[in-house]
Amino acid sequence: MEAGVPSARSRALAVLRVRSRALAVGLLPAALAVVLVAARTTGRLAGDPWPTVTLVVCAVAALVLLVGGAFAAVVLRASPAVTPTVPLSEAAAPDLYRLVRDLADRMDVPPPSAIALTPDCDSWLEDRTHAAHRRDAVRMSAAGAGSTAEPGPESAPGAAPVLVIGSPFLWWMRVAELRAVLAPVVAGTGPSAHPDIADARGFVRGLDAAVDVGTRRGLGWIAPPARLLLRLCRTDAAEMERGVAAAASERAQGVDYGLRIVAQEQVGLAYAGWDRLLTRVALPAWRMGRWPAHLDAGVVSALTELSRRDRLAEGFTSRLGERPACDLLEQPGLIDEATSLLAARLFHGGPAEAGPDWSPVDWAAYPEEVVDRKWRTEAARLHAALDALAVPAGLPPGPSGATASTAPAAPAAPAATSGAGGPVARSGSSGHTTLAAADSPPPTADGFAGPTLERVLGYLTDLGGEGAAGEALAGRISGELAREERDAGPAAGAGKARGADAVPLFPLQPPRSGRDLLADHVTAMVCCAAVDSAGATPGLDWLDGPVLLVGGDRRSDLAPRVLCLVEEGNPEPLRDWLSALGVRPEKPVRLV
């Protein structure tokens, strides 16, 4: 027996003792009532005040039994949270099931009852034998296959846990590496089969589910005792899980131990590449109403690029000649598409199914359908904000072909308004102040009409460094984005407060500041101008997301020049960059 098993069992018994004490507290008033009634019937407690005391104790006992019974029923029947996963049947991955069963046989533990995939860089065992899970499985199966449908083996009473595998592992790891990484996870089915450990885990999961039930209207009284019991058994439950993990790790030491050390390096590398792929590549597409249909295949490209850039990852690409673990799947493309859709739901809150406003996009079409559209959408939002701030749409030409950096004395100010309600322009570097009538027709620049980059440059130019115009424009953009997200919230699938319906479960990024949003929108406007007037093209970098390509080469020197304009009000570095590239700021750009 592994060293961790006795420790895990002793901790499980400690958790069960908390349950026994809670049961004893609930039965104590009833036991006292039985004693009083027996004493009254035998004449040992005759006379006052025992009749009244007996009646009060019996009433309290009945109330405690009623409340305790209701609480126990909630703990037993409440559905524990289940991780949203993509189920993987044995017919869809027979080789993977054989690999897992071979691992279980070598370690002499029960094999997992089923396998599921999750769009994350982790693997674990999950118990799905609760009666509520069986009811949900029957309901979902009946809806899709008729009334004769049966739930899967993982929901049968006493079934082994489900093995949940991170889908990026299947595409990045080789078969031998995956077997080495899964060995300690599969070994956990042995301690999980112990009755005391399984009973203790079920009790803790029931309490956790009861806390969630207590958030519903009319059931708030359930949450406090459930939280109290969770606090009482929290330490023992945590130590029990540590003991189970220690026992599983010890049992798995005889299976590919040397290879597991090398494979753990691939786990860290996969996590880094997966995080960059989601935040830099997938997130812009999700915000545009598109979801990349092959994220797992994309992580291979991202990790290969990371291996090329990072000296610490040198040599890892030589592994690509070995058999990838995704070959264990019968139809890896369909599985990749399903996990990609689930990733969009978990990390962004997208709908559970594809639709007209939520369609997949292939990597080959990503630059045109996501990057270009993203830039032009943000450029349109930027100019809409300028329109709301009554900034002139064009700039009059200078007396002798002067550039727009010297032609405008002062763009319109967003913060101040005249007494008649018209906007008042902010002071320019020359100290002049002008009034812009809200109903005056916008001028044009060099004969061009429409949204121009020159309009943005002129407005944000603030050599005095006050930054009032940039702050107002950033606030306008932030407000517009907040309204768009609020309007799109119900359509994105936000609904219930628990489980797979509470999306996004894991938001990828915190809210961005107004300055960051303004810099993103100005960058998008510059990229649109470069595409329209200098022959640049949108591109995709597997680690950095949307990029600007000039002559097939990525231009990574744009960001500091945009920040100089946004934060310091100095347009000269950006103007020099545009001039070297041949971009005409006064030429209108095409918006969506």
Image: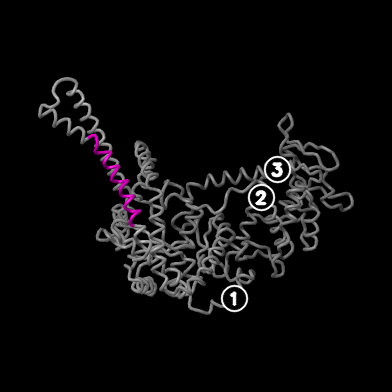
Q: Which residue is mark 2?
A: 516
Mark 1 residue type: Gly
Mark 3 residue type: Glu
The quadrant where residue 469 appears: top right
User: With respect to residue 148, does 322 lie above or below?
Assistant: below
The CA distance from mark 2 to mark 1 is 37 Å
Q: Which residue is mark 1?
A: 315
Find residue 155 and report its horizontal and vertical position in percent.
Answer: 30, 59
User: With respect to residue 86, does 467 lie above or below?
Assistant: above
Mark whose residue sits in front, 3 or 1: 1
Mark 2 residue type: Asp
Q: Which badge, 3 or 1, comes first in the chain's sequence?
A: 1
Mark 2 lies on a secondary structure that is helix
The CA distance from mark 3 to mark 1 is 48 Å
Q: Which residues are magenta?
A: 9-29
Q: Which badge, 3 or 2, comes first in the chain's sequence?
A: 3
The CA distance from mark 3 to mark 2 is 11 Å
Q: Which residue is mark 3?
A: 471
